Image (tube, grey):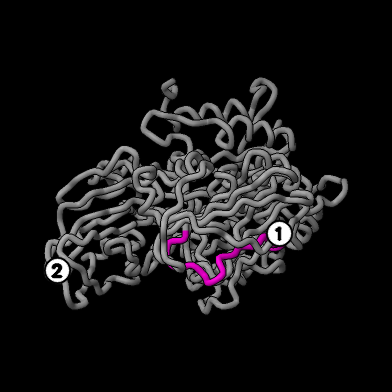
Amino acid sequence: MAPKKLPCLRSLLLPLSLTLLLPQADTRSFIVDRDHDRFLLDGAPFRYVSGSLHYFRVPRVLWADRLLKMRWSGLNAIQFYVPWNYHEPQPGVYNFNGSRDLIAFLNEAALANLLVILRPGPYICAEWEMGGLPSWLLRKPEIHLRTSDPADNMTKIFTLLRKYEPHGPLVNSEYYTGWLDYWGQNHSTRSVSAVTKGLENMLKLGASVNMYMFHGGTNFGYWNGADKKGRFLSITTSYDYDAPISEAGDPTPKLFALRDVISKFQEVPLGPVPPPSPKMMLGPLTLHLVGHLLAFLDLLCPGGPIHSILPMTFEAVKQDRGFMLYRTYMTHTIFEPTPFWVPNNGVHDRAYVMVDGVFQGVLERNMRDKLLLTGKVGSKLDILVENMGRLSFGSNSSDFKGLLEPPILGQTILTQWMMFPLKIDNLVKWWFPLQLPKWPYPQAPSGPTFYSKTFPILGSVGDTFLHLPGWTKGQIWINGFNLGRYWTKQGPQQTLYVPRFLLFPRGALNKITLLELENVPPQPQVQFLDKPILNSTSTLHRTHTNSLSADTLSASEPMELSGH
């Protein structure tokens, strides 16, 4: 049955939010009392102390747990975005089911006795794929997306507010409890003392505050966004954010310290301290070779390739996320190692290059722009391109993916391309559970290769963190669920969060499927840990440790790297 077409998402959400937040409009009210610089809720003075939580980064079965912990912390409201691309995957086709059920999330917030500050977009940033805008907008190559204004420090912002609005309540809509992580940089943190001091100072001023983030969650699948500051920076799978509630939903010392501050200004709920979730350790487990990605091309792209003289982008062939394979054939023999490159930084974002199925190396946006190749006339040249997440911040950032320019080998512009949009998640979910024929491969294959392992859990199931020591970079699935990207070699993130509900209890077999894009360790093993590793000790990059003062953000600090 064809998906139901609904009204425009933006027009749908705005009246919806008003209806849900004030269900009894005749008896409830929310007023900005400018004469007394305050809000009035149902006629009484009101100040909100809120925290950000993104329902799209938290599986539905965990919503209630996270919301109740936020309420216990003393919050009386939550703030969240609605990502357009999460709910309208194709033009006019809407999805509000499962973990996309916005109404169910609002109901859970009401049950937790939390008010809602709803931010429906259409642009949200949030370090989310394309800032929440759907990638199908880029099917119009000349489209102009958005503009933005530069950020400033809190004192200047409040001064500017009073210039244009002399009276009214003071509000900080995004008070940062931590910061995001990028692949290739160290895990960002913000000290408990800095966060609590800033919050207390603002509450003394009578301001309403929203803390971003209070619980970060996870960029499962391919949903992470990216920034561009000098070079392309892809955001990690973990969105832990050094937030008061950890990625796994556990209370941290920062949460207890913030609760103490909030309790000085308003009542906080009584009751026992929310315990951390039960954790599990397992392994190491040795994964088995399934086969090279190229061996499954017919299953990965059942509709066959798209032919074009010049390479086409992901958007041009309606491949929203993930991977696409480009294929052509060498028109003459190359005896000596010859430069192979894509002009104008035209690889978006990483290209895994193979000649006759043999892995040659990687081309990377802003980083690695050239390989040396040899080959015979008629040799098959395959380029697997990975979309590492579209830019989520910046002015008019039309971040097209794929090969944006035709590659050049020596002095020859390569033409006559085949594009294979790959449906890897479908292969993992539907085909790999079957016993596919084994493919002959060398002992230590390199390049894009599938590995898997089935395993039982003999004890009780708990939340866990999948560690991939020695692996390079790739994508991983648990029982068909796409956990997200790993990039062990680059860091900082070394483990992937696995919620316990993804695992089958004792007696049933679980399955790990892994797509390694580059090189496999000598021992192809993984292990489930009971603690995350979010900062690699071997990653020698600048650490974004955020030690902000209570009311100032200097231009040298990482707040300017992104926006929300």
Q: Is residue 472 left or right of residue 108?
A: left
Question: In the rendered view of the protein, which quadrant contains the N terminus?
Answer: top left
Q: Is residue 174 left or right of residue 260?
A: left
Q: Residue at x 33, y 71 (%)?
A: 368
Residue 510: x percent and y percent? 64, 47
The part of the image, by quadrant, that contains residue 347 is bottom left
Residue 420: x percent and y percent? 30, 47
Residue 522 within the magenta-colored segment of the rendering? yes
| Residue bounds of the magenta highlight | 516-531
* Of the pair 41 and 251, the residue shown nearer to us: 251
Q: Residue at x 56, y 43 (%)?
A: 56
- The amino acid pointed to by label 2 is Thr
The residue carrying mark 2 is 333
The residue carrying mark 1 is 282
* Count of marks placed on residues: 2
The part of the image, by quadrant, that contains residue 365 is bottom left
Looking at the rendered structure, the secondary structure element under dot 1 is: strand
Of the residues under marks 1 and 2, which one precedes in the sequence? Answer: 1
Disc marking residue 241: none
